Amino acid sequence: MLYQLSYALSYVGAFGRPSARDSRSLGGPGHARRSIDGMAGRPGRRPTYVGPMAGGASETEPGGGEGGPGVRAGLGHRRWWVLGAHVAGSSLVQAPLMASVFMLPVVARKHFGAGDWETLAITALPNAMFVTSIFWNGLLERWRTGPFLLVYWVCVGGPMLATSGVTSLWAVLALHAVLSVGVSGYIPVSGDLLRRLYPEKARGRVYAVLLGANMVALAAATRAVGAWLDRDPEAFRVYMPLAGVMALAGCGVLGALSGLGGGRGPRGRSERVSWRGVVSPVLHMREVLRGDPVFARYEGAFMTYGVGWMICAALLPILATDRLGLTYDQTGSSTQVAYAWAIVAALAPFGLLIDRIGPIRTSGLAFLGLSAYPIGLMLADGPLGLTAASVAYGIAHAGVSVGWMVGPVSLAPTREKAGQYAAIHATLVGVRGALFQFLGVWLYQLTGTFAWPLGLAAVSFVWAWRQMGALDRRVRSPGS
C-alpha cells in the first residue's frame, strides 16, 4: 500500500484541482457533493472525474492543461520516448526501494532477532512519515528539480548504501527512520513531472501506465529479493546498496526529463515560501474539517478503514514468520507479488466504476470487499492461503486507491481548496499509521492470538462501508 499511496499522492499533485468544466459539471460549490455521486447515468449530465482510466480534459485549449504549449512543443513526436524514459526512471527509483522496505521487517526478525515492537517500528515508520510530504513539497517550490532529487536521494540512497555495514538492530532502525522520511519526498516531484511533461487530458492514462508498469517491476523486485535472501541471508548487505545505486540512476533519468518541461511558469523556483505557508494545510486542518461536514465524514470513513488496514499491515510480518514459518521467497511471493498482480488487474475496472458511481460509493464497496482480507489472514495455514488473501486484498484495494486519489479533489469546494484537501488527506494517513499499527500489535500480545486484532480489522472495514453508505445517502438527499 505504501507504493500505491506514493503514486496516488503524486497523481493528486499532478492534477491539483478540478478544471473549470469540472466545477460547472458538478453544479458549483453549493451542489458539488450531491452531483459527485448523484449524476452518474443522468441524461446529458455526466460528472467529470480524473481517474486512472479517465482523460480529464480541460476547456483551456484542446489537449491543454497546466503544462502549456511549451511542454507539448518540447515533447512533440518524442512523447512515447519520454513516457518510456519516465517509466524506466520511476521504476529504478521506486521498485527496488519498495521491495527492500517491504522485506526489511522480515529480515529484522529472521536475521537480527527483532521482537514484535521492533518489527512494528520498522513497519509503521514509512506510513507515519508521510506527514513530511508537505515539507518536501515546500522544498520543491524553492528548488529546481535536479538539486531536489539529489537531496531526496541522499535521504533514501544514503541509508540504503550504509546498510551494507550494519551490525545491530538499532543501526537498522536508525537508518530506516531516515529512509522513511526520504520516501515521502518522491511524492511532490512525481506529481510535478506529471504536470509538466504531459497535457492534462493525457495524465490519467499516463498515471495508469506508470502505476501498472511500476507495480509489475515491484513484483519482480520482491520476488528477486526473496529468492536471493533464501540463498544468502546476508544478501541485504548487497541488494539494498544496489537499490540505492539504481535509485540514483533513476533520479538522473527523472532529472533529465524535468528539463523537457521548461520552466515552472508564474511560480518561479526562487519564490520564498515561509514554513508557516508550508504547514498551513495541517494548521488549518481542524478548521477545514469543521467547516465541511461532507469531507469530514469522508475522512472519518477512511480513518475507520485505516484501523483495519494498519492492523493487517502491522501483523503481516509476524504472521508470516512466527505462525506460518515462511521463507523469504514464500513471504514475498504470497504477499507483495500476489497483491501487485491483483491490483494491476483490478485498476481499470475500478477506474471505470468510479467514473460511473463516484468516489463515495466506489470506496464504500471497496471497503466491504476488504473485509475478506483479515479473514483470509486468520484462515491462512500456508503460502497458498496467504496468496489467496493477498489476491483478495489487491482486488479490493484497487477500489480504495482510486477513491483515495479522486475523492479529495472531487470534494474540494473550489479549485484553490483542492491542494489543501489533498494535503489534509495525506496527513491523516500518517496519523492513523502512527496509531493503529500499535493497536494491532498490542491486541495480539494481550490476547496471544491473531483472531482478535484481525477480527477488529474486519469489523472496521465493514463499519467504514456503512459510513460511506450513510454519507452517500446524505449527499443524495434533497436539500443536502
Image: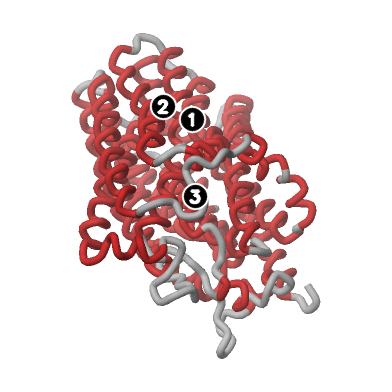
- Mark 2, residue position: 155
Check whether the beta carbons of the residues at disc 3 and disc 2 lie within 8 A of each other.
Answer: no
Q: Secondary structure at mark 3?
A: helix
| Residue at 40%, 51% in the rendered image | 263
Q: Secondary structure at mark 2?
A: helix
Estimate the spatial distance between the alpha carbons at disc 3 and disc 2, rounded to whole Å: 19 Å
- Mark 1, residue position: 181
Instruction: Check disc 2: other Cα within 10 Å, few if <14, some if 14-19, many if 20+.
Output: many
Image vertical order of residue 243 relative to residue 49, above or below: above
State the residue in front, 70 or 285.
70
Q: Position of residue 241 (x, y in %)?
A: 27, 24
Instruction: Check disc 3: other Cα within 10 Å, few if <14, some if 14-19, many if 20+.
Output: many
The first of marks 3 and 1 along the sequence is: 3
For the N terminus, the quadrant is top left
Estimate the spatial distance between the alpha carbons at disc 3 and disc 1, rounded to whole Å: 15 Å
86 on left or right of 36: left
Image mark for residue 9:
3
Check whether the beta carbons of the residues at disc 1 and disc 2 lie within 8 A of each other.
Answer: yes
Estimate the spatial distance between the alpha carbons at disc 1 and disc 2, rounded to whole Å: 7 Å
Q: Position of residue 25 (x, y in %)?
A: 60, 78
| Residue at 62%, 27% in the rendered image | 442
State the residue in front, 234 or 392.
234
Q: Is residue 1 visible?
A: no
For the C terminus, the quadrant is bottom right
| Residue at 27%, 57% in the rendered image | 83
